[in-house]
Amino acid sequence: MPFFRIKLRRLLCGIFSDVIWIARADSFQVIGVLALVFFQAAEGTVSGAVKSPNIILILADDLGYGDLGSYGQRLFQTPRLDQMAREGIRFKQYYAGSALGASSRSALLTGLHTGHTRIRGNADIPLDYGDFTIAELLKQKNYHTCAIGKWGLGEAGSTGLPNLQGFDEWFGFLNRKNACDHYPEVLWRNQVLTRFEENGNGNKGLYIPYKFTEAAINFIKTPRKHPFFLYLASTLPHQRVVAPTTKPYKDTDWPEPQKMLAAMIYRLDRDVGKILDAVDALPGSRDTMVFFCSDNGPHDRDGVDPRFFKSSGPFRGIKRDLYEGGIRSPMIVRCKGRIQQGVVSDQVWAAWDVFPTIADLADIRPPTGLDGSSMAGSILKGERLPHLPLYWEMHEQGFHQAVRMGRWKGVRHGLDSPLELYDLFIDPGETRDLADAKPDVIRQMTGFMAGARTEVEEWPIP
Ligand SMILES: [Ca+2]
């Protein structure tokens, strides 16, 4: 029996397009398809066991596509995230909202890509009252909402505070630069600064990512009547490249920064495992869906060389690049006993699809005008869903844009610069610019780009 309600209207819309398509191919198959549709629809409406799931969204910070064993990492291990992938779906073509943290988070939480979302770079612009987050939407269905970790979408006294953007509870760093300190002396708990004596006077007594995990587990374990939404924005493995020790990689012959980076990812992996264990201990563990992804590609700070571990996987570029290495991210979705296990999916999707996907899973109609679309069918039923071209723009060291359109990837460094064109199917490393050979694709892509963004005062094009 399907766990989440199948919406008859949407199902029929989808199926009618299938019917039309099949009718063109072979008119004799139409009756068979329709019969199947009504069987499925009837099954969906009589299932009865409709319950909005708990949602946990875990966002790593600067974790590269190649930084997990299940995504090809061979030098260090991520056993718990690999296990999570075996127990759920591992998406190979998921993209972050941006190659930078703040804009990526803005896209993730608002369901709008960087041509439309409020925050399109790392400038200190907060979310505004008019911005509508996934947490605000879930509040419409009495979800209990909590954000933990790194916010980066509004400082104290601004309109962008988590408590003003749909989160009942909030614990962590408002300021993204402060979040570089893994041993902070103070942190926000809702509107109040909480002091950690362990880290006073320059002491390093409490590695704060551990505290975030503990807070997340406490939130998960709290009994409540309504479902919950937990957004855990980890500060790992972002700079500063510091872990309590370099264990378990102390005895390798790697450079010290690489040992430390791997030790940070080891702790991220272990803590995700603790959270999954807490989920499995819930009476409603089968009603809890966990998403894990990253906000952008790997960094090169504090002596780290992203080439050492091949942190971008097979891709070109790192954080701040709109080439694949800056934006292609791991995405693992797990809901034990409810979605298929051990699936590897080629579905193309991006951070701005997460909002409508979660809305769909929670059976709430999302607001109109979002850039994303629901991937629930892909997660629950393994469907291969069509997707509009994906669009990114970045206001950092100039103005950069990228588009993913089917097999094609376009990248442009300024409105007047030529559009580079890569065929991701045969050249995932974006090494051969095919712009001159494919004028029709360039025309299509530039046409799409012209309509993909709004001009706003806060983000002038230089
Ligand atoms: Ca980041």
Image: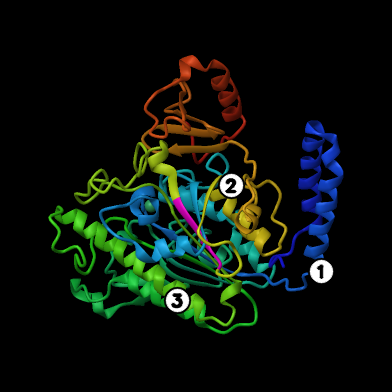
Secondary structure at badge 2 equals loop
The residues bearing labels 1 and 3 have C-alpha atoms spaced at a distance of: 32 Å
The residue carrying pointer 3 sits among few (fewer than 14), some (14 to 19) or many (20 or more) residues within 10 Å by Cα, namely few
Q: Is residue 118 left or right of residue 258?
A: right
Amino acid on which disc 1 is placed: Val
Give the residue drawn at x 65%, y 68%: 139
Amino acid on which disc 2 is placed: Leu
Q: Is mark 3 within 8 Å of ligand 1?
A: no
Give the residue drawn at x 47%, y 73%: 190
The residues bearing labels 2 and 3 have C-alpha atoms spaced at a distance of: 32 Å
User: Label 1: which residue?
Assistant: 46
The residue carrying pointer 1 sits among few (fewer than 14), some (14 to 19) or many (20 or more) residues within 10 Å by Cα, namely few
User: Label 3: which residue?
Assistant: 277
Residue 442 spot, x, y in % from top left = 54, 21
Lower position in the chain sequence, tag 2 or tag 3: 2
The quarter of the rendered structure image containing the N terminus is bottom right
Lower position in the chain sequence, tag 1 or tag 3: 1
